[in-house]
Amino acid sequence: MSLVPTFATPPGFLGLPPRAGSTGTTIAGIPLDLGTTNRAGTREGPAAIRRASRMLVDGAHPVTRVDPRALDLADIGDFRLALGDLAGSLALIEQQAAEHQHLVALGGEHGITLPLLRALAKRVGGPLALVHFDAHCDTWPESFGQRFSHGQPFFHAIEEGLLDPKRMIQIGIRSPVEPETMAWTLGKGVTILSAQAVHEMGPASVAAGIVDVVGPAPAYLSFDIDALDPAFAPGTGTPEIGGLASWQAQAILRRIGGLDFRGMDVVEVAPAYDHAEITALAAATIAWEYLCRAV
Amino acid sequence: MSLVPTFATPPGFLGLPPRAGSTGTTIAGIPLDLGTTNRAGTREGPAAIRRASRMLVDGAHPVTRVDPRALDLADIGDFRLALGDLAGSLALIEQQAAEHQHLVALGGEHGITLPLLRALAKRVGGPLALVHFDAHCDTWPESFGQRFSHGQPFFHAIEEGLLDPKRMIQIGIRSPVEPETMAWTLGKGVTILSAQAVHEMGPASVAAGIVDVVGPAPAYLSFDIDALDPAFAPGTGTPEIGGLASWQAQAILRRIGGLDFRGMDVVEVAPAYDHAEITALAAATIAWEYLCRAV
Amino acid sequence: MSLVPTFATPPGFLGLPPRAGSTGTTIAGIPLDLGTTNRAGTREGPAAIRRASRMLVDGAHPVTRVDPRALDLADIGDFRLALGDLAGSLALIEQQAAEHQHLVALGGEHGITLPLLRALAKRVGGPLALVHFDAHCDTWPESFGQRFSHGQPFFHAIEEGLLDPKRMIQIGIRSPVEPETMAWTLGKGVTILSAQAVHEMGPASVAAGIVDVVGPAPAYLSFDIDALDPAFAPGTGTPEIGGLASWQAQAILRRIGGLDFRGMDVVEVAPAYDHAEITALAAATIAWEYLCRAV
Amino acid sequence: MSLVPTFATPPGFLGLPPRAGSTGTTIAGIPLDLGTTNRAGTREGPAAIRRASRMLVDGAHPVTRVDPRALDLADIGDFRLALGDLAGSLALIEQQAAEHQHLVALGGEHGITLPLLRALAKRVGGPLALVHFDAHCDTWPESFGQRFSHGQPFFHAIEEGLLDPKRMIQIGIRSPVEPETMAWTLGKGVTILSAQAVHEMGPASVAAGIVDVVGPAPAYLSFDIDALDPAFAPGTGTPEIGGLASWQAQAILRRIGGLDFRGMDVVEVAPAYDHAEITALAAATIAWEYLCRAV
Amino acid sequence: MSLVPTFATPPGFLGLPPRAGSTGTTIAGIPLDLGTTNRAGTREGPAAIRRASRMLVDGAHPVTRVDPRALDLADIGDFRLALGDLAGSLALIEQQAAEHQHLVALGGEHGITLPLLRALAKRVGGPLALVHFDAHCDTWPESFGQRFSHGQPFFHAIEEGLLDPKRMIQIGIRSPVEPETMAWTLGKGVTILSAQAVHEMGPASVAAGIVDVVGPAPAYLSFDIDALDPAFAPGTGTPEIGGLASWQAQAILRRIGGLDFRGMDVVEVAPAYDHAEITALAAATIAWEYLCRAV
Amino acid sequence: MSLVPTFATPPGFLGLPPRAGSTGTTIAGIPLDLGTTNRAGTREGPAAIRRASRMLVDGAHPVTRVDPRALDLADIGDFRLALGDLAGSLALIEQQAAEHQHLVALGGEHGITLPLLRALAKRVGGPLALVHFDAHCDTWPESFGQRFSHGQPFFHAIEEGLLDPKRMIQIGIRSPVEPETMAWTLGKGVTILSAQAVHEMGPASVAAGIVDVVGPAPAYLSFDIDALDPAFAPGTGTPEIGGLASWQAQAILRRIGGLDFRGMDVVEVAPAYDHAEITALAAATIAWEYLCRAV
């Protein structure tokens, strides 16, 4: 009989006590926001996601029956960063990521995915497949003159051979885009499912499409919270209307648990623009869906 | 020709003047929040729901054509409660509920449903059927050591014989849960429709399922506003993503008006976490759908 | 290589510099809110919509491939109004609207549509067809004694012969309504698609219905942001739950670009009730969908 | 022993039940906002002030020892207004004000003071003295072409002989102003104490100055909440920094209770811009200071 | 050279790592809110105060030169509570408080002070002196029928002999109050300084008065955040205007560091009503002023 | 007779139309936030300050009688920056600043002051005197490893000989600080007035002290909005309680207009944390006080 109500849950992700690492899955916050192009503040994301995760502490996942309390999880706190130094921060992230077997990263902006993929591709020994939820393709070669903003991670990851673009699928895409950027991405072999397609196909078809593209390859999940509609995730920096409902994302994720995932991130939560923690809770729940997936 | 614009609507539910009771339907606020397990503040729910209901004053329901101004309705204000005393408050609620023929209760937290059902089962002379919208099953035997928190009303109502669990259906369920709690609930004969099931079945099938389960028995409607997704109802204490859109709840309710309802509540509105009154308006509209149902 | 990040986009719509007019499409703000019946503040709408439009500056529409930077667009700023004088403001709006070939108006309340239609019907030389997204039919003959509030524009527009009611379709309707108002509207030949119908039909059927009703006639698009659900558009004065998701509105608009549109407005954004600019962004995106429509 | 906690206080001012009038003091809301020049929404003021007044229900004033529960007070609800019609609304306000002996008006915008003074000057049979707290002198002859906006009440009141400008004092003035407007006002004999003067003189000197100016004449108190600094009253439409702290206003009011006050208003509360009810509570407390003044 | 920017400070108070206790000073959260009479939510107080304290981590106090990093401090997390059970929670608090030498408690509501004083008076072996900042005297014998709400702690503490009322001073008092309650309090010998007195006396005089009253007795500091004006501390449940500026509280505290303090609490932070963490930061800073006092 | 109400003021500072420069005073936004150490978002500062400045458009300064409409002012929009590149942005700022005779910069974070001083010292041909309002001394040699964050501008400006530290005064200082940083600053000859000193001395003495320190030297004004208390300026990244009231800042500025000012900045407005524009209005008003100073 516990005497610690939900509202008094300790501040680690899912109430976990601080720990230096895990041979299972390691959770880390990466509070970077130097490369954001519109609204700022993803530096506050990890703390907000942890706080919101208290809703998920008690009990097992209602569908998969996985109980996160039975998993080997460690929340190691936040990665060190170089204040005001984007290149330095990306290097620090890669270096710290290399220390962990299986990482669930709580962003921070989407630029963190590039060093995470660098470390993971090295560990895996070859390119990864990618399941990428986002409103934006993030394959621009530069944004406003910056080559490592939150709009470039997948351009570089493809160019650097960290990802196999033919095993890469983007879900929820809907922002304005330069036609040449779209052409480059499709030309590399990336599969793109627009948000409108997701709405009109339904989650079962989307999930089948993902499984088709990814296949048995070692895979990574990168979930930009702006894949969700601003109604479901207002607390983000580059919102686009017309996005996914959170139930759609969950219904898709619950059908792709059998993929060979080696890590994930959930990024772009900007708490200053959130309301009643709904965006942070969405991000926490996405990570929980991943942790509790039926393999 | 009225000179009282919407923004100046008097503060009673649907602008009703204060009245001590009704031989028709009685509306009462029950501002309890002592048994909440996460975010607080449902004590502010009744006032917020009344204020939001001004949007529904002028005109008839667009589908059922019922005009609430033609009904025998009284808003008696808020029930008396015992400050800081959960057991005392539950006893006071039961005692006051017993005075009314047909009650529409504006919560307040979900713990109020237990004394409301106690009073109503006594009046009806036997167990009730239940249509229960919620993110949580609320059949835990205790929460953090407390046996009468907002997570227990239906555990006790079944144990006390106030409800017939075989005529009880839960819609929108999606929180983490102990497997034994789920097993107990299903073992009693309760029907559970998860939120994901609602999304994938559509409202017409859900409504047909409800009618099947409830049948001709005297029935009660308990609507926890967290059945809705946090996008539609951020102003609540224990949000879970992946919930219903408000249109889905309405589309279901509009198809089950023929059930033999003897009362209802709408609970768990926590205005401090609401934005632009959208949660309070959702709750007010759910009550209005009930009042204007096509019987 | 630009050095102006998204957050520093100049304040015109889509970052446009101030200009006095255009032979193509002219964008104008009309910050009226004198005729609102519930929450106030649509006077702040145009500035908020412009600011939110910065998300849409870079790149082409992802579906139609139209790039707004290639269009002949001018943002002329806000129309002059008569402070505290509803009749005077309506006259000023009509007079200023008459100066522009093709107008995209950023409201402001829905009362602005009447003088816009007066000017446009005169220019076109006859009644217009209308595609009207809204939670309310706005064909009341008066509201609380006022004949020119935001609840009357289409009553007068039909009575004055500015619209051909048989080529007029309303999408998203769901508010309480006097049965006689509904009867009058239907009696004139207006087609009404309730929000629930939109949800259950799907956008392709809705779009087909619109094309059927409007046909080849010169048409106007009036988009009241409260057509969207309050989850998607909290920043408005007369919200009603059960409304459209923003993706539904987009999916409909993308299928009716072939209509002979002569102008549009997006109205009823009340920024004081918005959160994280989501309502303003929805309105900006609706205007952008219109500008980037595949003709 | 009460069982109605503060949070369940009924919605009348100080929890008063609805009543049609009083031979003592009558409280009325006047939800006008048609003549506001910047941010909108004072229409929501009366309801917010009433709700906030629940903090003042239990007990006597700590300094004057007056217990408002012992006074003959009636809250008659809100005055009727003409929607969207400024002139019509002003006429309605004057007509309704004439029915009451001693009125405490909860605004609404400052334009309501003109018809209130018209009614009161008629009742008193001559011009009144005025104690006027405000950031703005409100003696502009017109604002943006409108002669009856919230910037004109005292221009007209002086011109119509409703006020004796030599017995009129303005406290807290600090906005930009046309030099000719300032010259006109001073030329009429009005005494102006800038906010900076209030800060540097201290409340005792200010109160002495007020008593000097007003003397034994029948007097009116008009309190624009923007007299307070935006830190203390963010929920208003035309804020100016550098304003009074709320304690300063209270310390002044507590020293001028002996004046022969015949009525008062507290205006310009715009709840959409308030936070945590602090502006509404400030307005409610100012009215309570007036009601509980030591005469 | 640290690579952990302020925004990534770990979540303990002043960034302290979790620890089970300290022979120096122990910091504990006590997230109680069952006995609040108006707005709810002090259960969220401790987490918010800890998060806000990150502004105070780096460097020494600018006046006293005390560096909190050099002190023997432990943050033990939150006390266990009995959900929904006020009496049970008070008993649990007393029991846990008894385990610590010198406690700084982060509330939670003011009702926690009674069990804290019970434990401390037992440890000290006699009644304590009290320095009490508050808008309310909190010596009511009951509130709405409840004898242990947040309005009673000092009534019971005096009645139980935990405090020496002649060595007890209340600063900032300004709420409405029953004259008999005020008379009882003064009759016991308590010194009361109203908020208005504080404003007009200045902090040096107030501090001298405190030192006079308390003398060399073992003393306790109880700081209700509503002693501050709602402008400085909106995030609280029972705000009263006219309160202290935060600088005044600091200027007083900095002059009374020489008292023989044995513990303190800062209570009544309700984060749901806070804005931009300003209330939480005020509470964190008050605790920091205490920890860094010049003894 | 204008028909453009305050709420429709065009978006330039004080409603100014876009212009490329001025031989008088040039206003520029500098939306940098890469070097902030706590909460992010000063990139949104310039747009928010401009929008808030609409309150100051009509009329002359009430004390100095200067009318900003009579000045030679240009608002050139925002400086170009290098996205995600702190060093590159500082270089761009210096380069653009060098083009203007007399600059009023709207931040952006405090790091912008260093390149502004570099450009101005070069133009003036020697070190400047400095009037510096702030909660923080900003003379740290580095922050978390970053040598050009918003905590370093005055360290470098002194080291680079851009400022004469003996003619430099800091007003409002109150944050925790390393004793060695304080010692270095004082050792250079800088005068520091803590916030508590300002409160206890009064603005006239403070102003006299400033005039004494600065003397006839060419001077610069740098106003960090966190010099104000968070009650007056919540919208900032590194708030500290106990700060100045906005009237105090104004009362000081109005007494030092005779100094030989050659430029100014107002920095650290982070609109995502603002409420009802009060911080942005404070910043706009500080710039207006500067522009309207009595020379």
Image (cartoon, coloured by chain):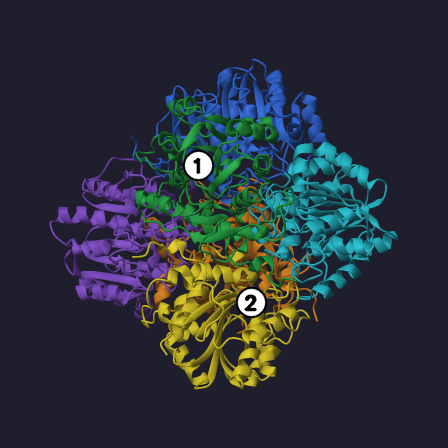
Chain colours: A green, B cyan, C blue, D orange, E yellow, F purple
Q: Give left or right: position of B163 versus C274.
A: right
Q: Is residue B65 left or right of residue F198?
A: right
Residue that label 2 marks: E79
Q: Left or right: B91 with respect to A290?
A: right
Amino acid type of the residue tagged 1 in the rendering: Ala
Rendered position, C160 above or below F79? above
Which residue is at a point 36% across and 30% down the rendered structure image?
A: A159
Give the left or right position of residue C206, taking residue A133 as reference: right
Residue F36 % position (x, y): 33, 51
State the residue in front, D78 or C178. Answer: C178
Mark 1 lies on residue:
C52
**Above or below — where is C54 with respect to D215?**
above
Q: Is residue F258 visible?
A: no
**Nearest the camera: F181 or A132?**
A132
Decide: is A119 above or below A169: below
Point out residue C162 in the picture as x, y percentages from the top left corner.
Answer: 57, 21
Residue D33 in the image, given as x and y percentages of width and height: 52, 46
Q: Is residue A248 above or below residue F219?
A: above
Mark 1, secondary structure of its residue: helix
Residue C46 in view in this figure: yes
Q: What SS does tag 2 mark?
A: loop
Farthest front residue?
A125
Between F33 and D89, the residue placed more toward the observer is: F33
Q: CA distance from mark 2 to mark 1?
A: 45 Å
Residue F183, image quadrant: bottom left
Residue E229 rendering spot, x and y as whole percentages: 47, 64
Dot 2: chain letter? E
- Residue sitting farthest toward the left: F125
Chain of the residue displaying label 1:
C
